[in-house]
Amino acid sequence: MLQDAGLPEGLTVREAVDLQAGYFRRRLKTADILEQTGLSALAKRRCDKLSGGERRRVQFALAIGGRPDLFVLDEPTAGVDPESRREIWRTVRAKAADGGAVVLATHHMDEAEALADRVVVIAGGRILVDGSPSLIKARAAGSTVKFRTAAPADQLAGLAAVIRASKDGAHATLLTTDPRSTLEALFVEHPAVSELEVASASLEEALADVVAAGQGRDV
């Protein structure tokens, strides 16, 4: 599935899916493809009458119709609505569970965290990180501490166990390897905080730490 691809504008969704799947010996049935991609209700609509998100779903349907062992998906949920995104995620999980291998390129780290068994981050011709989402998060940082404060980010960055501190207005976010030590130091040095929240670091936050470190190996 390419990041940007055209569709046969004069055909209906059903006709386009059936045509593409027909090139393959062990194709899925057209009705099954439409159901798996949430397109059954759009089967009779012409491709030139589809919205951007609907077109992405059709492109996804064309990619899975031949029943491949290897799925290569480039930004499959770019521009789609939340419901379509969930449908694509569900189908990707099902294909992997059935034994298919999925290579997925995405800039959405929540998507990588939700779908991937292995994440590879490439920047500037170098592999910065390669591992499972849980391993990356464990290696990079333990938790995030979020709160409101008047203290500047550079002072917060000096608190115990803090790897990185950032602020958006009064909202501060600390990435820490030891949230207890960070909180103890925070209450001593900046007690006037509110809306305090402690959570495990997300994959996006962990990867930001890895990228900032600038380590890696050549591709």
Image (tube, rainbow, N blue to C red):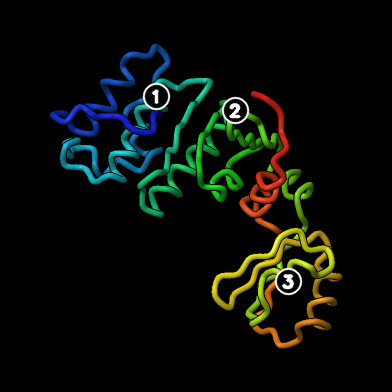
**In the figure, is residue 165 to the left or right of 60?**
right
Residue 125: give its label: 2
Which of the two residues, 162 or 130, is positioned nearer the viewer here? 162
User: x, y percentage for residue 95?
Assistant: 53, 32
Q: What residue appears at the point 30 percent right and 21 percent down from the top-left corner? A: 20
Chain-order first, disc 2 or disc 1: 1
Q: Which residue extends farthest top?
A: 25
Kind of residue at disc 2: Gly
Chain-order first, disc 1 or disc 3: 1
Q: What residue appears at the point 79 percent right and 47 percent down from the top-left corner? A: 139
Badge 3 crowding class, 10 Å Cα cut-off, few under 14, some 14 to 19, many 20 or more, is many
* SS assignment at label 3: helix
Q: Is residue 83 above or below residue 123?
A: below
* SS assignment at label 2: loop
The residue that label 1 is drawn on is 28
Kind of residue at disc 1: Leu
